[in-house]
Amino acid sequence: MLHATLSSEKWNTFPLIEQLANIGSEVERSIKWREKNYDYMILAVYRALELIDLTLHDPKNMGGLKEIARIREFIIDYFLGTNIYGSSDVFWQKYFMVYTRATAQRKTFLLQA
């Protein structure tokens, strides 16, 4: 496990939007490291895939498994494959920004409540 301090039990306590925001952070790291250090990029991709796998196994996410599995497939294709789906850095940044913003808004709301 690449996230040494993260258990599936702890991961499962996060809402889906926060899980996806965390996956997005690893994807963002992958994008940033691609040109600078291939080994770091690979580690970030593997961490993203690990978080996706934890998300796929979270019982509360059973209704969204198809989309989560598709995200996994697209990430592998984009960073490790031939990019047959035509993804781009901008696509991934926009896709995950929604979850990052929603998580930030949720945390602000909870602090104010």
Image (cartoon, helix red, strand yellow):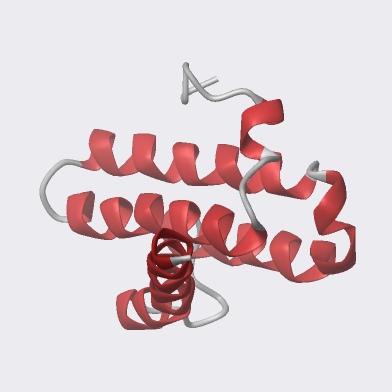
Please state which of residues 101 and 78 is positioned toward the viewer in this rendering.
101
Q: Residue at x 54, y 25 (%)?
A: 6
Residue drawn at (74%, 60%) of the image: 69
Q: Pick the quarter of the image with the N terminus.
A: top right
Q: Depth check: 55 or 85 in front? A: 55
Total labels drawn: 0
Q: Is residue 89 above or below residue 30?
A: below
Q: Examine the rendered structure and indicate whether residue 96 appears above or below residue 23.
A: below
Residue 11 lies, in percent from the top left, at 62, 37
> In the image, residue 66 lies at what x, y percent?
82, 68
Location of residue 9 in the rendering, given as x and y in whole percent from the top left corner: 71, 28
Q: Nearer the viewer, residue 94 or 88?
A: 94
Residue at 81% across / 67% down in the picture?
Answer: 64
Q: Is residue 100 above or below residue 9?
A: below
Please give left or right for residue 8 compared with residue 99 in the image: right
- Does residue 37 sit above or below 73 in this rendering? above
- Res. 84 image quadrant: bottom right
Q: Which residue sits furthest left?
A: 36
In this picture, residue 51 sits left or right of residue 65 = left
Q: Residue at x 39, y 82 (%)?
A: 94
